[in-house]
Image: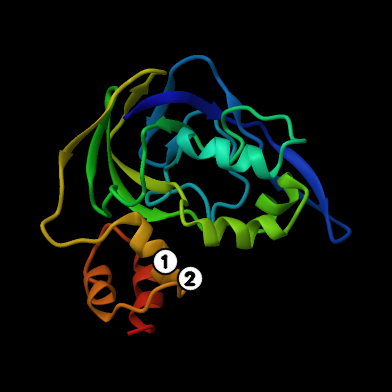
Amino acid sequence: MYIESTNISKPKTILWKDKEINTGIYKTPTHKAIYLSKTGIVNDYVADTKVHGGIYKACYLFSSNQYPYWENIYPNLKWHWGMFGENLTVNGMDEKLIMVGDIYRIGDAVVQVTQPREPCFKFGFKFGNQNIITQFINHGFSGTYVRVLEEGLIHVKDNVELIDRLEKTLSVAQLYAIIFSKINNRKLLEIAVTLDTIPFEKREQLRRMI
């Protein structure tokens, strides 16, 4: 795997149900290195810090390999890297092979996989169709959030190198399917609630599903 694009956003105001709302989902390629800190990308705008940014969602990764699928469904959009609100567009990323708790070196930074992305109405607004939320959930390739173990610069073409993996875990794709009740697997749920790489609130939500 390697970094295809580094992306950040400036504040953008949208009108949703007669209310003005700020969002940071309109990310575009920087064409330069970005600095990954413990709480997020330096100079990247995060609107709602309750659900984005912070320690467990410091950076969002999405696979460039998924772009052709969505371009085929939404051919009239102006496509570019960062369309899904990702900070890092990653070539060769597969959520079925990325495991919760995996530790990767990317450029000068070291990150740990925490949880999949759960789409919200702002995602639907950007694509001009709230149906994309259900489509995105059903497709099963969510991208992933990471927390930062070591801060550092990340450049385009930097390799994403696996350096450690938990003995007992589950894939990002499996966790995503569990969150949205696409699979009912008590064994995987019991593993998920033990992983402190997943935020406490999310583990409590999963615990109630057991």
Say if residue 28 shows up in the picture. Answer: yes
Element type where label 1 sits in the image: helix
* Measured Cα–Cα span from mark 2 to mark 1: 5 Å
The quadrant in which the N terminus is found is: top left
Horizontal placement of 183 versus 160: left or right?
A: right
Residue 126 versus residue 186 in the image, above or below: above
Residue carrying label 1: 177
Q: Nearer the viewer, residue 15 or 133?
A: 133
Q: Nearer the viewer, residue 54 or 128?
A: 128
Between 107 and 36, the one lying in front of the other is: 107
Q: Where is residue 175 drawn, in percent x and y?
A: 36, 64
Amino acid carrying label 1: it is Ala
Q: Which mark is residue 57?
A: none
On screen, 141 above or below 204? above
Q: Is residue 209 left or right of residue 83?
A: left
**Residue at figure coordinates x 60%, y 52% from the top left:** 48
| Total tally of numbered discs in the picture | 2
Label 2 sits on residue: 180
Q: Position of residue 165 (x, y in %)?
A: 15, 48
Q: Residue furthest left?
A: 167
Q: Quadrant of the C terminus?
A: bottom left
Q: Are marks 2 and 1 in contact (CB under 8 Å)?
A: yes
Give the image location of residue 51, x and y in percent.
53, 57
State whether residue 24 appears in this view: no
Q: Position of residue 208 (x, y in %)?
A: 38, 84
